[in-house]
Amino acid sequence: MYKQKKALSLTIILLLSICVEAKINIPVSASKQELCQEIYQKMTNEHFFNDKDLSSINAEIFNALVAQLDSQKIYFTENEISSFKRKFSQFDSPNSYQKKYLRPSLCSIDLKSNFAFINLYFNRLIEATNYQLKEVAKRGFDYTKEDIIVIDDDKKNWQKSKFELKKVWKRLAKNDVLTSMLAEKELDEATETIEKRYKNRLKRIAQRNEEDVFSISMNNLTSFFDPHSSYFSPKSAEDFEMTMSLKLEGIGALLTTEDDYPTIVSVVPGGPAEKTGKINPDDKIVKISQVEDLNSTPTDVVGWRIDEVVQLIRGKAGTKVKLELIPGKTEDFSERKFVTITREEVKLEEQAAKSKIIEIKRNSQSIKIGIIDLPTFYIDFNAWRNRDPNFRSSSKDVETILRKFDDQRVDAVLIDLRGNSGGSLFEANKLTGLFVSSGATLQVKESNGSIRPWGDARAKQIWKKPMAVMVDRYSASASEIFAGAIQDYQRGIIIGQKTFGKGTVQKLDDLSSGQIKITESKFYRITGAGMQSKGIHPDITLPSTWDIEEIGESSYETALPWDEIKPVRFKKFSMGLSLISQLNNEHLSRVNQNPNLQYILDIRKRYEIQKNKEVISLNIANRRAEKEERQSWALDIENKRRASLNLETFSSYKAMEDFNDDKEALKNNKDSEIDIDNDYLLNEGAEILSDYTIFNQNIYLSKAA
């Protein structure tokens, strides 16, 4: 009997050791208070909007903190939110007693309340995770019960008590196990996966330090001014420098954390991730495997610190890493895709412009279209500074391609800037000059109000035939400068979707500890119209599979506003703008007849139906039925497309998946090239340019007087 009691007590102790609720209580040091004030002064003195109203800055920072830490309203009670809101607001407008006794601070930001709120968040996360661990360990969830989780954050309210929060935590834990089961796992395996994930989360919360809390606080301060200003801790500054220099052996992807998931922000043009063609922004990483290590098991990285995820992905060039991802635009987190990537150092050559010539038949005519895929506006700055005449740059490479196109009697050029997030503004100027000759490309407005035009006074027009530019929502910054100038000069047509809308320029400054990136100027089109938030609107809009307004500059709450300034004088080309409507009619006619474009529209229809979904079921039969319905829908629209093209249809979803995997593997074994056959929008862009070439012959040789 004594031995049984002793064994029972040991079991209880072991269980308690797993679920111990270690308190996080990270205080703010005087040195961080001083650094906070240094950052505050830099932002208020040097930011483009240095006259921004600061009367409610702490209240705004609190709102941003809540949105960042608990947008789902699952960790804090209504009273806790109200209490902290009062504290932050009082720091903005203290009464005389508070000024004298309660507000001695080295910083104009309520850093102590920031730390207190973030500490509470970490402690509540520990409490919730321990509670979920206990519930999952019971293996008592009823998956036949009709239960739901509200997933629309706008439909949620703050809970009144901790008791109500625990109900939410339990449903979330149930959904985690259910989602794991739907990813082809049995109950025991799914439960073990989630238990390990929760324990990893607890381990990583315990590793949080003052720099982590300070970074969260300061980045909410910088984002109060605009979304592109940010604080880098000494370690983050080192990582940022490695990313910008591209001297990193890895996969070439920028990551962030979103709802515990390491999430792809963007992929580096020419990098290993981009080359796979299977990794996209918003994809969420679930597990990472080291392919060469035969004894290695996949590591679940949900809940990990982002720097630890990055370290796990990085590795020696030539080695392989396998990622298990949740697709960014999926309807259910149980969907998975697996991508194996060979690590390598991203080289300038791999970002270089690629080209291809295709022929399009128009009645008795054959139109030669030269396509140039430009993934980024690059320049080898070191070679350029050393006055190496053979330095690589996007404008030099494109000029070489254009001269070859001329020799090969190409009729028109299509510049593909989709996914091009920018790069060197100097190169955007140089590239524009190849098509419009000398003249202003953009205007730059400094924080002091001074405005100056940018351009290349010595530019020579290399290409005098028809041209078009393809853009999408991920085309930003230098891409928008180039596309905007081509549109303003009426030099060519813009095809695609509205661009990102980033019309600001940042500088990087050293701090006494770490670095700060500050927005210092805005750029405008030569017409005086701002690019900020609005972006470049295409002349011909192509269909998209999703709502592009979900991302882009206009989706950021603190994005700087659109405005306009005076235009500069410039001469337009004699392009027939009246033909845009005719081109659009031709395009819409093809959309109605082209199975590939109809396929894109079918995906968009599905997206519109699903995007406003407010709840998900916790009934396993319902969720399996939803998954089967999604797969059936995907198979149906693909078979509809293939039947219309007289291609063999697939007998099952599995057959379709296997076919796509084989096609992807074959593509990865080939040199990277422009895939006009499988890029339906690029194909349509070439068709539009062919129409344009026929309608506008012999009018591109000079600017109008």
Image: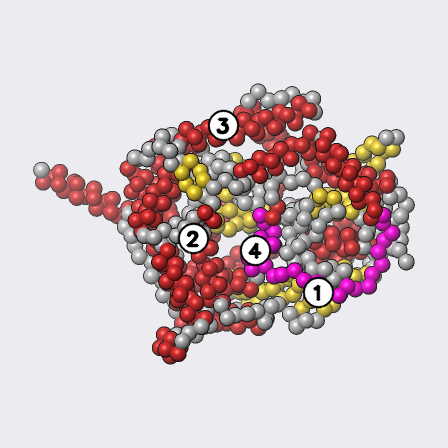
For the residues labelled 3 and 1, the Cα–Cα distance comes to: 53 Å
Direction from residue 327 to residue 645 in the image, left or right: right
Q: Residues within 10 Å of mark 4 (few under 14, many from 20)?
A: some
Q: Which residue sits at x=61%, y=51%?
A: 552
In space, the residues marked 4 and 3 are separated at their CA atoms by 35 Å
Task: Quote the CA–CA distance across marks 2 and 3.
Answer: 32 Å
Q: Nearer the viewer, residue 332 or 576?
A: 576
What residue sits right under mark 2 in the picture?
Answer: 70
Which quadrant would the N terminus be assigned to in this image?
A: top left
Q: Position of residue 648 (x, y in %)?
A: 65, 21
Q: Of label 2 and label 1, which has the lower sequence position?
A: 2
Query: Could you say which disc has been placed on residue 628 in the image?
Result: 3
Report the mark closest to the observer, 4 or 1. 4
Describe the colour scheme in one phrase: secondary structure
Upstream in sequence: badge 4 or badge 3: 4
Number of callouts:
4
**The label number, if any, that marks residue 444 in the structure image:** 1
- 652 up-or-down from 670: above or below: above
- 37 drawn magenta: no
